Image: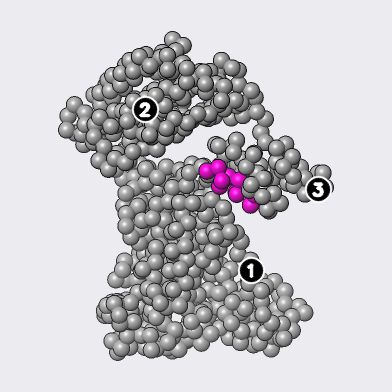
Amino acid sequence: MHHRLDNKVFQETSRNAAQFLMLCALRKALRGTDQFKYDTSGIIVCLVDKEWIWHAKSAAMLLMTGGRDRSYYDDFRRPVYVIGESIRRSAGKGVEDFTVFRPDHQVIYLASSLQGVKHSLQLAADVIVDVKTPNARHILAAREVLGLEDIDRPLAEAIAQQPAEIVVGLTARRSLKGLDLATLTSPITAPDRSPKLSDLPGYGPARAWVGAIKQDVAEWRDDKLPWSDVDRGVLLVGPPGTGKTLFATALANELGFDLVSTSVGAWQGSNKGYLGDMLAAMSASFADATSRRGAVLLVDELDAIGDRTTMRGDHAFYEGNVIGRFLELTTHALEQPGTIIVGATNYGHLIDNAILRSGRLEKHVHLDLPEDKERAEILAYHLNRSLSAAELREVTDKLRLATPADLEKLARAAKRAARIRRAVVSIRDVEAALPAKIPLPEAVVHRICVHEIGHALMTMASALGDVISIRVESHMIEGEPVQDGGRVHYKMRDSALPVEKDLLARIRIMLGGTAAEEVVFGSRSIGAGGFEGSDLDQATRLAYRLVASYGLGKGLRYQVGADRIDGSFLPSPELRAEVDGILAREYRATKDILTKEKTRLMRLAAELVVDRQMTIDKG
């Protein structure tokens, strides 16, 4: 047990009013024990007021470790446990499910009442102490080390009689001038936790999960549900701007939890970025979250944590240690009542599978671009409902590639325009804030139509899809490097176990656009490639899955998981040659089909040029 803290640890502790107050209270309670006086090993049970128990956990850890990294301790050498509040119960017995063991070190068990402590632990304990709440002397000392204005003893004594949150808040307040004793008993308005997920539009794929976890947390708070039955780890996957960070913030607000926000990049940039610095920063973020009585820990850029299946060269040792430590911290944190971990990434397939397994970040929510109705609702929300979603549809229906972040930016610009006019936001302000659009030449529109009809005809030929809808754009947005000139939607027929023929047909559908251009114009444009998610990107990845994962190539080979076929996958020259052969063969087959259908292809493309949209119902 550490009687004195080094200067650095003391300075850090003194900035945390709650931790410092409980450190004082714990030292006062333990001062007469052999464990404190002579540093002997043993079991100490501390009875702490329920409001202070989580602050006591943080202080007890500091008292026992002196501020050293918690990674030094394994499950059987952890120096501090919280019982009674940890809703990890044996089935139907309502008591803590842990083993009492005789330690060769010091261990503190924190409980809010003796009735919540197993009889076996009471008998095994070397000492049971009652930890009083921080007193006036502790409050005066805390204000002194915080460098705050002095207060008199009667005011400190009055503060000490208040609930924990008021004690901590007033202890850390810079000035208490003019504060009378009556003020202390006045109700304090709870801070507005906004926005909440239930107030936000969008997030369709996550709605059911959020509703379930909100109900579970409510039952956990009422001691009706053990924390182990609550979903506690979730991974958000989606392109930039789809609202992953806002999701975590709104989830915390929905549950009444604190948000602890960090990123793998922040850990890597800590201090000099050495392995020890990285691990220490990571541990600090988890410690911050688990020390609270309810927290959502957001870890952004989670793909940067690495994947042990792709580690090579000099960085393997570094990355292996980082992933291993992250797994340990995640497992421990999710066991702590009130801790939820939200990982966010643009590239879910680059994350180590052990992180994503059941018991860790087991719930995977894919956030895609919002649908037509959602776009209007999101924009209306950011415009403070000054315009209804129905009124905004004429604008948002044309913004099919807009992310929630784009819509928020549009709302800011529209509100700024309204402020300049000194008026409420109108649809005119929204339209004026839209990015400039440039009309596409008719020759370009014609090529786009041919391209999209090529996809549609190959879908019809494949017998894989029904109700094909096509639309093309007449304008391009100025300054945007990647744009959606047209799109084909079709409902896939159910196929629980696709066969090789079905997968090759999908490749032909993806190649249908560029093949149609060559059939009609004798040349191809760059419209089939150039970015992730393009026609060629999807066709190439599916071909690699065929030969490297599904065993549907020349040999019965499994080389890599289907979800690992991405930019980091390094195929052998032999594998590349086989994929090139598949793509070339299917492209020839696609051209042959479209050549036979050239008259129909040109007729449908001409109709699409005129109407800009088309629906084909095969039923």
Q: Residue at x 44, y 58 (%)?
A: 208
Residue 245 in magenta stretch: no
Could you tell me if residue 322 is visible in this image?
Answer: yes
Of pointers 2 and 1, the one earlier in the residue sequence: 1
SS at circle 3:
loop
Question: Which residue is most to the front?
Answer: 619
Could you tell me if residue 27 is visible in this image?
Answer: no
Q: Which mark is residue 423?
A: 3
Q: Residue at x 40, y 62 (%)?
A: 232
Circle 2 is placed at which residue position? 460
x and y percent of residue 377 in the render? 60, 49
Q: How many residues crowd mark 1 within 10 Å: few (<14), some (14–19), many (20+)? A: few
308 horizontally vs 248: left or right:
left
Q: Quadrant of residue 561?
A: top left
Q: Quadrant of the N terminus?
A: bottom left
Circle 1 is placed at which residue position? 191
**25 or 158: which is nearer to us?**
158
Of pointers 3 and 2, the one earlier in the residue sequence: 3
SS at circle 1:
loop
Question: Could you tell me how far apart the alpha carbons at marks 3 and 2 are, in whole angstroms?
Answer: 52 Å
- Relative to 583, does residue 148 appear above or below in the rendering? below
Q: Residue at x 36, y 68 (%)?
A: 229
Residue 382 in magenta stretch: yes
Q: Which residues are magenta?
A: 371-383
